[in-house]
Amino acid sequence: MSHPLLLAALLLAGTPKLSMLPAGDVRPRGWIWKQMDTDLREGLAGNYPKVSSIVDVELFVRKNGTLAPPYEYPRGKVARSWWVGEVEGNWLDSVVRLAFLTDNAEYKERVRRAYENVVKAQQNEPDSYIGIYVPKDRFALRTQTEFNNGELWTQSRLFQGMLAYYEYTKDAKILEAVKKAVDCTLKNYVGKEVFYQGSGVGHGVAFTDTLEWLFRLTGDRKYAEAMRWLYEDFSGKENEKPPKATLELSYDELRYPDRLWWSHTPHVMEGLHTPVITLAMTGDAKYKPAADNLMMKYDRHDTPGGGVVGDEGIGKRLGTSMLPREYCTMVSAIMALNRIAVWTGDFDATRRSETIALNAAQGARFHPALKAVRYLSHDNQKDASTPAHAQRYLYSAWHGAAPCCSTTAARMMPYYVEGMWFADHQKNELIANYYGPNTVTTTVAGREVSITEETDFPFSDKVKFVFGSDAKLTLILRKPPRCGAVKVAAPGAKVDVAADRISIRGVWKKGGAVSVAFDFKPQLVSEPNLTNAYHYSWGPLLFSLPLGEKRKTLTEFETLDGKPSGFFMWEITPEHSERWNYKFDPKEKFAKVDLPGGNRDTPWANPPIGLRGRMRDANGALMDVTLTPLGASVLRRTSFPDCTQPVVGPQEEWIIKARKANPDGTIQQSGARKKMQPPAK
């Protein structure tokens, strides 16, 4: 759907256009289940306590966090207590989702104990407070700018996992605990000024997640009014002193369509959905220009493999394959874009998150188990050997900059699963939004329906939906990127194909099926923000030329008792660096092929498909090459220049200058940012 994002009817609704299915209604199968299971049992998700105790501090039980002094935990210290609360909350969110989606009894029990301990600790609080702070430091206000208040941020991280646990288990005491804690927070905050330009405070815009979810669960309008307060207090004005956090997301700033984003990418992605949800929940037309311009601005900074550019800051840079993005911002974006789709009914939002989940996010981690992640990754990734920028460019189980990416990376696929299906109960529609092997068992318009999706998507363009129950409904299929002549087999059903969806209305008996073939073909796509830069795609997948890799361990992290953990920090250099200079020849065609050794259960470690053709090397000679999915390579070249055109364009010149100005590839200093602005678009 084209911009503006919001339909006029949204102003009158006050409720989501679509229904997010309860956690647990969608169960992964095939490669998705295998990835989640391996990440939990063998990867960082289930084993992070071996690397650091920061996830096991039980800060929400002990409540010994403070605003000012560094917080010490068994294996070090961090500058602010809220760092520990963030990490603990996000890590539990990953573990609870993985445990229930893979039906792992050991980790189900672990999260049950963790959340029940939080509820028990709440019972000792007269006002039902759940948070990280000692009593004197709770609910700090805007006037206390000498501190870095993480109250809303840390609560929101814990509540994400608790609300998921409630939906998985239907344990009412967990929901009641969250509702009471939120009442306490709203009593202390609504009507007051909280936000200013501090990192912990600014992250608090993510309390949107808590308010939005509670509103969907309860329909209570107090959460809509709290959402209005949150966005009003968050939204700053130009030249305001002290400045409010993340000014570019304020509704006043978003009115200006031509202004680029500049500040901390994680803050922007954590609040990406806030303007849209505030408009939808309150119906207040003053927020509509902000919501209408939101995705247009997002797209300017989006990289081809998915994810808004950022090496902490966006820096007014247009997204390209040469620029980095941060792992935790990709996870935040998927979650936010799911909710934008639900509240607006606009499938175009999740086209972006599908790209992230099936490309950039897979390509910034190890496979098959999540044993290391690259904090900052690129579509074009020549090496991963520099410890500059606090180790952000290394694949590691832990980075000196922060543990945010390594502890949140395992949340990515659970949020993809969350967005695989939506429902429209008024229209009796069940909507397939993301594709992949899964079974959905849910209620649509009061009737239970079960469908198993048989597919190897995105490594196949064919999907079969097999009904596990009788059903009378309309099945809506979102059209993934770059479809060809779509073919649908649905005997006896009425099929309508539109620009963004396929509608199939029918009556099915148990065992009935609908099959669709999306007819993907290799395509050469031009980058919008780089001159003479093109990448190959097949459906939602981008394809890269692997550079090979030579791995060297820099360090093995010890467990708390001093034993080897099996988790490392890595230095990785290319085995075939000459491939970095390859160019494509427009006369040469690429074909999709099945690869020897491919494994559809572990497709990112053993890619089952590739694109085969020829490219020209630095000397102009034609070389046989096989491109593999971006997510299946550690070091790679994804975008290529046309050998018949000049190589360097205005935007690439700007990138080169920026890297010379700051050798580690960052643009952190305001002086450099002012001097090195990209060309006006």
Image: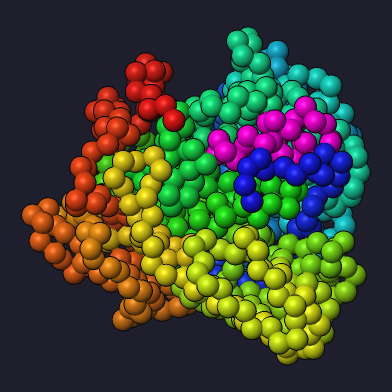
Q: Residue at x 55, y 58 (%)?
A: 354
Q: Residue furthest left?
A: 619
In the image, 157 versus 586, the foreground residue is 586
> Would residue 458 be found to the left or right of residue 669 on screen?
right
Magenta stretch containing residue 289, yes or no? Answer: yes
Q: Residue at x 49, y 62 (%)?
A: 482
Query: Residue 500 at what x, y percent from top left?
Result: 63, 60
User: How many labels were placed on the picture?
Assistant: 0
In the image, 199 versus 236, the foreground residue is 236
Q: Using the rendered image of the protein, determine whether residue 557 is visible from the camera's viewpoint.
A: no
Q: Using the rendered image of the protein, determine whether residue 388 is visible from the camera's viewpoint.
A: yes
Q: Where is 297 relative to 58, above or below?
A: above
> Would residue 514 be found to the left or right of residue 400 on screen?
right
The span picked out in magenta is: 271-298
Query: Residue 376 at what x, y percent from top left?
Result: 40, 43
Q: Which of the colour schemes (rainbow, by chain, secondary structure, one colour) is used? A: rainbow
> Which corner quadrant of the image does residue 480 belong to?
bottom right
> Which corner quadrant of the image does residue 559 belong to?
bottom left
Q: Where is 17 relative to 476, above or below?
A: above
Q: Residue at x 57, y 60 (%)?
A: 413
> Would residue 247 be found to the left or right of residue 643 on screen?
right
Q: Main secondary structure of the magenta part?
A: helix
Magenta stretch containing residue 349, yes or no? Answer: no
In the image, 676 versus 174, the foreground residue is 676
Query: Residue 484 at what x, y percent from top left?
Result: 50, 69
Query: Residue 311 at what x, y percent from top left?
Result: 42, 36
Q: Residue at x 22, y 59 (%)?
A: 585
